[in-house]
Image: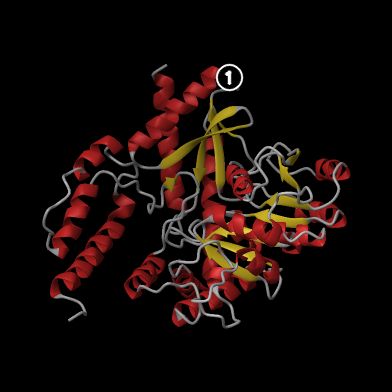
Amino acid sequence: MGGLSQSEADALETAARFAGEYRRAAPDRPVAASKTYAAVLEQFREPFPETGMHAPEVVTDLVRRAEGGLLGTVSPNFHGWVIGASHPVGVAADWLASAWGQVASFADIAPASCAAEEVAADWIVDMLALPAGSQVGFATGATMANFAALAAARTHVLDAAGWDVEAKGLFGAPDVHVVVGGEAHSSIFLTLRYLGFGSQRVHVAASDDQGRMRPDALRDVLAGVGGPTIVILQAGNVNSGAFDPFGELIGPAREAGAWIHVDGAFGLWAAAAPSLRDLTAGMADADSWAADAHKWLQAPYDCGVAISRNGAAMRRALGSTAAYLPQVERRNPCDLAPELSRRARGLPVWAILKHLGREGVAEMIERNCAVARRIAERLSAEPGLAVLNDVVLNQVAVACGEAAGAEADDLTRRTLAAVQAGGVAYPTAGNWRGREIMRISVSAGSARLEDGDRTAAAVIAAWRETQGAR
């Protein structure tokens, strides 16, 4: 009894075959989904089966029903949001993580998974030149990574004020002042709600025209608050890719006794690229950092990392204890992230870092940025297209029309729709500096300069078509 039946083995092999075929064809397949959600829902909808289906036939049926409903996020010309392309080596390791079925919560329960995660964590700290000994938790994504890091921040600043938040909660606790930039990502406000701080009780330090927090604005805000304080900085603005000037911000925040956190969902990885390290200068002097491994590191979804130089505060805020759980003192992944039951997210990260190495990660990031610059250069040369941001990273913010206004916003929306419908490339929409924009994020590890040329050509063709239809 037990083991693997021939039917189950055939299902695994069938899935591997379909996956290989899909990934091989990805660069030549239209990037947009060809069917609406309603149409795909109808493909899946059926009464609950009374009897089961042969295992490999289930896999084949799944592929058939998903046809037309897959957005080409693994394509080198997918530029929507900031989505990594799930590196095949990471996918292979992720398959093993699922096949092994490990619950990677405690080292005693899943020794191999936890060991690989600890090594991957050390490699990340080393690669990003963060303080040695910093602790890393693997969460579902940057939202929960921010949550984990800011939970540690909450514990630390309230403990310094003589309040044990783990024991007493927030009722009656000293006020914690949270300072964010004028263009903090929406997930930060969601995280603050989770932590009981609320989304409207923050202090906002104004940003400049690229979305960077202004040092004078931070000093003004800090002068008006006192007591427990958390300052949240940003590495990589979601529209412009800009970085807060850490060297000018961390000093005043430190003088105010604040815990300093960096939201670096994709921008944190720039610290791994020698040519971009000037953007991250001073960032390592913060207290905690958060990033998505499933963005620029190309890990399969879902995987975020929370990093804290104060591991004790992190474990105190997040640690799990119960009589039935292992009590051995060592690094346990569930003490560094919100979930107790968790998949072995560290395995694909370990595999990707092992495959790429320090040089490979740096080359990938720098190449993506070069592709973004190539796209921006070509679009800037086209009359009527405006690149609104300084392209310092992998983000390009494009607007159509000669001047801001309702007509220009309409042109941008129509051009974006034409690009997406064309199937060659897939940017997504945004609103920045009072204008509707087309956000082009170069986040696929496979993207190369020729892919950037294809994207630029698709945008220019769509823009010309839109102009002609006016």
Question: Measuring 19% from the left and 67% from the top, which residue is drawn there?
Answer: 11
Q: Nearer the viewer, residue 444 or 250?
A: 250
Asked if residue 4 can be seen in this view, the reply is: yes
Question: Measuring 42% from the left and 61% from the top, which residue is drawn there?
Answer: 300
Question: Measuring 52% from the left and 55% from the top, which residue is drawn there?
Answer: 368
Provide residue 137's location: percent of width, then percent of height. Answer: 57, 67
Q: Nearer the viewer, residue 84 or 163?
A: 163
Provide residue 443's location: percent of width, then percent of height. Answer: 49, 53
Image quadrant in which you'd find residue 288 = bottom right
Of helix, strand and loop, which one carries label 1?
Answer: loop
Would you place residue 332 above or below residue 32 in this image?
below
Asked if residue 36 can be seen in this view, the reply is: no
Provide residue 418's location: percent of width, then percent of height. Answer: 38, 31
Would you place residue 2 above or below residue 50 in this image?
below
Q: Badge 1, how many Cα within 10 Å: few under 14, some, many 20+?
A: few
State the residue position of label 1.
405
Q: Nearer the viewer, residue 222 or 370?
A: 222
Would you place residue 404 above or below residue 429 in this image?
above
Q: Is residue 137 left or right of residue 170?
A: left
Which image quadrant: the N terminus? bottom left
Which image quadrant: the C terminus? top left
Provide residue 295's location: percent of width, then percent of height. Answer: 50, 56
Q: Is residue 431 left or right of residue 260?
A: left
Q: Nearer the viewer, residue 167 or 16?
A: 167
Type of the residue with mark 1: Gly
